[in-house]
Image (spheres, rainbow, N blue to C red):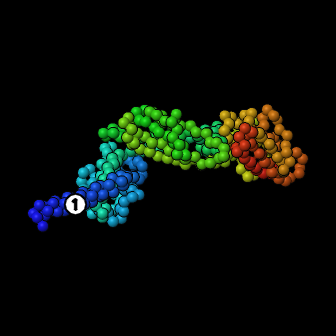
């Protein structure tokens, strides 16, 4: 074989080797590029200063169980971690904590991700909009076909200073659907009315700064409750005795007359005798006629010497909202 032929063969072999190596490198890069980037998910979504936050890696394509994982917190390598999550404590001065992770799989694929963890929180105050009688110490509840106001109270700091709600952006969601018209700068409250069919309402809010960076978030599940009606004695001298409701049994003793007033609790009324309220009274199961001007009152009179017990019951309905109804009863002991 001539020297010229040997040189051609050697050149061919070198070129073939180069192409093979290039092919391997290209193939490896193609695999790496085809895999989606890793995500870092923090839990809870927002935490106040000094509270713990767990950051977890998420990727559906990589085998993270056998991968080499290095975590960095504010640029400092946290050796010996090697796990898919890390827990840190939020800074107390409102500054961000930078978390970085570098993942290298057993087949040489490398991915990395960073996330800034800010200290901040937001409380959600639930305020059902429904009727309660004067001096009632309790709170109204959220009803089927009812209305509720949710107020977000942020507690976020930027560069060590607490940020006012009017300078923050609020993104409200209901059942996962963003409520765009209710969201925006300074919109720290929202009013929601439940619909039919009646379900629990999942409301969430995200708070961000002017650059769109999320600073805090929270969510609440608002469950429907049932309305109620309470009974009070009405005195001719003192008016309605709100200090004590009539429960279970009332003993007339020597009284000749008892006026009982029914007060709705948590109905979607603006007062206790609106046009949409239907009061139906019963005595021992028989319907009782009432004064149409005061449908929430019943007058009980004691005559003769007969003694015994009567069961007084009331059905109260909102005629415009079929899911708002209730009933209650009490017993009256009469006679000596």
Is residue 54 among what the camera can see? no
Seen at 33% across and 65% down, the residue is 66
Seen at 36% across and 55% down, the residue is 35
Q: What element carries label 1?
A: helix
Q: Quadrant of the N terminus?
A: bottom left
Is 60 or 263 nearer to us in this picture?
60
Is 203 or 126 nearer to us in this picture?
203
Picture layout, residue 335 above or below residue 211: below
Which image quadrant for residue 61?
bottom left
Is 196 or 164 nearer to us in this picture?
196
Residue 8 rendering spot, x and y as whole percentages: 15, 60
Residue 296 rendering spot, x and y as whole percentages: 76, 39
Query: Is 69 on the left or on the right of 143, as rendered?
Result: left
Picture layout, residue 147 above or below residue 306: above
Q: Mark 1 points at which residue?
A: 16
Farthest residue, direction front: 2
Seen at 51% across and 40% down, the residue is 178
Residue 319 rendering spot, x and y as whole percentages: 75, 39
Residue 214 rendering spot, x and y as whole percentages: 39, 42
Seen at 68% across and 36% down, the residue is 269
């Amino acid at each position: 074989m001539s020297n010229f032929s040997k040189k051609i063969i050697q050149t061919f072999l070198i070129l073939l080797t180069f192409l093979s190596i290039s092919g391997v490198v290209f193939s490896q890069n193609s695999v790496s590029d085809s895999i989606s980037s890793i995500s870092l998910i923090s839990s809870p979504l927002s935490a106040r200063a000094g509270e713990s936050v767990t950051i977890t890696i998420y990727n559906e394509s990589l085998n993270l169980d056998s991968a080499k994982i290095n975590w960095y917190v504010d640029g400092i390598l946290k050796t010996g971690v090697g796990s898919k999550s890390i827990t840190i404590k939020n800074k107390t001065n409102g500054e961000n904590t930078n978390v970085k992770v570098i993942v290298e799989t057993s087949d040489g694929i490398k991915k990395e991700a960073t996330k800034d963890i800010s200290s901040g929180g937001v409380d959600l105050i639930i305020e059902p909009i429904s009727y309660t009688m004067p001096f009632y110490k309790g709170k109204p509840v959220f009803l089927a076909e009812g209305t509720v106001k949710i107020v977000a109270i942020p507690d976020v700091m930027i560069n060590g200073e607490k940020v006012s709600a009017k300078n923050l952006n609020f993104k409200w969601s209901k059942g996962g659907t963003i409520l765009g018209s209710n969201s925006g700068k300074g919109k720290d409250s929202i009013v929601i009315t439940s619909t039919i069919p009646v379900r629990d309402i999942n409301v969430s809010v995200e708070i961000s700064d002017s650059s769109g960076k999320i600073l805090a978030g929270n969510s609440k599940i608002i469950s429907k409750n049932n309305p109620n009606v309470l009974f009070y004695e009405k005195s001719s001298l003192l008016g309605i005795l709100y200090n004590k409701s009539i429960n279970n049994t009332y003993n007339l003793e020597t009284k000749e007359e008892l006026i009982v007033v029914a007060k709705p609790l948590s109905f979607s009324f603006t007062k206790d005798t609106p046009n949409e309220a239907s009061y139906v009274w019963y005595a021992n199961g028989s319907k009782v006629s009432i004064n149409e001007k005061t449908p929430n009152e019943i007058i009980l009179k004691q005559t003769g010497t007969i003694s015994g017990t009567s069961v007084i019951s009331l059905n109260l309905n909102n005629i415009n909202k079929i899911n708002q109804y209730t009933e209650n009863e009490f017993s009256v002991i009469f006679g000596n």
